Image (spheres, rainbow, N blue to C red):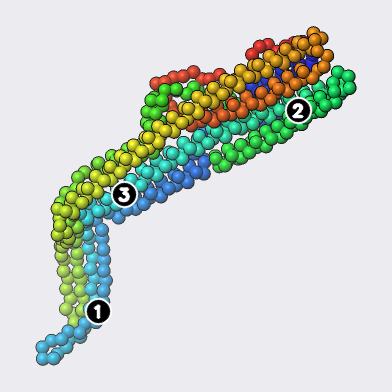
């Protein structure tokens, strides 16, 4: 009965926690939290933050260029003045002008508007950075779950292939007596399938490792993955939506943008007056020794003829900008509501499929126990019914891992939402073994 004990142990490999004996040599354990904590190294996150940095530098540059401005002009000329009685006076002139100027009224408002535009761009870029960080975090969770599934599938296929190959060696001598050649060929086909599943799982495992490396932008050695579920997920849609909205970087950036627009205040008549204050000093040098200097104070102003209409247009533009951002907030809210609804429905479906797969696995195990009992009691002479039941148990274990993968991927979009007011227990890993391992 050594085969039956080995079969039970090998199929147990598909459980979420494995004995140390099944751990791959040289592969240290690595928790998922260690990977999600390294999102700052992601090239996509760094690229998004670089965009924020550029906008901040543009804002500082424009801010430094505002306020008082100094100017200087140096000009030279050959002057030919026509005097009375057809007399001319020719001389050379050198003139230098220096001074300072400062924008006032509408000119100052224009500078502040340019700064506000850059500030709005920075807020939006920060929102996009947060969104990209969340997206990369979700993709890391998905890649880790796929890595975990591939790792478990590889271990399951390896253990099953080893036990089945050993069993077939013992059955080879029974071909032609209690075992037909076609039945032996059927068992060998199951062995080839296990070998193929092992090869595919190993390749999938390596592929997901490359996916993690691409997401985080750093080299990652093969590791022993842990159960990729850290906590339960709230099942109350309203609580999930409010928590998602509170933490959503796009909604947060839009709310900050509305606040910036409202802080600008309403438009007045002076905002339409383009004015500058100019303080200048002029020094003139002529070759006739008629030198001189002049200090002046000037105030320039440009006023549109339709002053009231221009003011109303500016006010309407500000209101339209506020409304635009508010509409964007509402559109994002509805999109988020839809995504959460879809994710919750997918989680419910995959949870039910996961439970059904667990029940089918229990039934396959019971069927194998029954065929083993019949073989031990002599009710059947051929080992093929028990072997077929064992093969079926392995196939159901493979199917259960598929359902487990779907369930883990359905959880990924919701796992990043913190809901402290809706505490739910951490789900148990699906354990394939529901009773003690048979000893006979």
Classify 326 as above or below 163: below
Residue 77 has which mark? 1
Q: Position of residue 346 (x, y in %)?
A: 50, 28
Q: Earlier in the sequence, mark 2 or mark 1?
A: 1
Judging depth in this view, the residue of 304 and 45 nearest the camera is: 304
- Considering only vertical position in the picture, is 3 above or below 103? above
Label 2: state its secondary structure: helix
Check the image and name the residue furthest to the left.
84
- Neighbor class of circle 2 (other Cα within 10 Å; few <14, some 14-19, many 20+) is many
Q: Secondary structure at mark 3?
A: helix
Q: Assess whether mark 2 and mark 3 are in contact (beta carbons under 8 angstroms).
A: no
Q: How far is the residue under mark 1 from the one under mark 3?
A: 44 Å
Q: CA distance from mark 2 to mark 1?
A: 101 Å
Please name the residue shown 46% across and 36% down the image. Answer: 134
Pointers 2 and 1 in contact (CB under 8 A)? no
What residue is drawn where x is 55% and y is 28%? 408
Going from the N terminus, do you reach mark 3 or mark 2 first? 3
Would you say 161 lies left or right of 172 here?
Answer: left
Q: Position of residue 61 (x, y in %)?
A: 34, 53
Residue marked by disc 2: 190
The image quarter in which residue 12 lies: top right
Which residue is tagged 3? 117
On the question of residue 98 being in view, the answer is yes
Q: Nearer the viewer, residue 321 or 219?
A: 321
- Of circles 1 and 3, the one toward us is 3
Q: Earlier in the sequence, mark 1 or mark 3?
A: 1
Find residue 219 and report its horizontal and vertical position in percent.
60, 40
């Amino acid at each position: 009965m050594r085969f039956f004990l080995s079969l039970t142990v090998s199929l147990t490999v598909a459980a979420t926690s494995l004995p140390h004996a099944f751990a791959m040599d040289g592969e240290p354990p690595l928790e998922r939290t260690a990977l999600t904590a390294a999102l700052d190294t992601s090239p996509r996150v760094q690229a998004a933050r670089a965009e924020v940095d550029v906008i901040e530098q543009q804002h500082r540059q424009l801010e430094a260029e505002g306020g008082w401005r100094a100017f200087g002009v140096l000009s030279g000329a050959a002057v030919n003045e026509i005097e009375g009685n057809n007399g001319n006076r020719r001389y050379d002139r050198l003139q230098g002008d220096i001074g300072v100027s400062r924008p006032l009224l509408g000119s100052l408002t224009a500078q502040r508007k340019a700064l506000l535009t850059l500030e709005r761009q920075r807020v939006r870029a920060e929102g996009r950075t947060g969104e990209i960080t969340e997206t990369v975090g979700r993709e890391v969770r998905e890649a880790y779950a796929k890595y975990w599934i591939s790792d478990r599938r590889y271990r399951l296929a390896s253990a099953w292939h080893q036990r089945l190959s050993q069993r077939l060696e013992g059955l080879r001598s029974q071909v032609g007596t209690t075992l037909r050649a076609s039945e032996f060929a059927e068992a060998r086909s199951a062995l080839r399938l296990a070998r193929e599943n092992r090869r595919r799982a190993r390749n999938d495992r390596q592929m997901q490792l490359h996916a993690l490396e691409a997401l985080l932008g750093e080299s990652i050695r093969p590791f022993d993955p842990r159960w990729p579920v850290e906590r339960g997920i709230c099942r109350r849609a309203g609580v999930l939506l409010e928590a998602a909205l509170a933490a959503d970087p796009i909604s947060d950036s839009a709310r900050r943008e509305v606040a910036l627009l409202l802080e600008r205040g309403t438009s007045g008549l002076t905002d339409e007056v383009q004015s500058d204050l100019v303080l200048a000093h002029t020094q003139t040098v002529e070759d006739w020794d008629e030198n001189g200097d002049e200090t002046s104070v000037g105030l320039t102003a440009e006023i549109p003829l339709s002053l009231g209409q221009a003011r109303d247009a500016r006010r309407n533009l500000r209101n339209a900008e506020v409304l635009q951002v508010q509409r964007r907030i509402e559109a994002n809210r509805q999109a988020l509501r839809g995504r959460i609804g879809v994710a919750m429905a997918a989680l419910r479906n995959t949870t039910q499929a996961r439970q059904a797969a667990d029940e089918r696995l229990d039934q396959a195990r019971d069927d194998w126990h029954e065929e083993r009992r019949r073989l031990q009691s002599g009710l059947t002479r051929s080992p093929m019914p028990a072997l077929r039941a064992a093969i079926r148990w392995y196939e159901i274990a493979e199917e259960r891992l598929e359902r487990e993968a779907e369930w883990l991927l359905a959880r990924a979009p919701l796992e990043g939402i913190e809901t402290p007011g809706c505490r739910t227990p951490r789900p148990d890993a699906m354990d394939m073994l529901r009773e003690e391992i048979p000893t006979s």
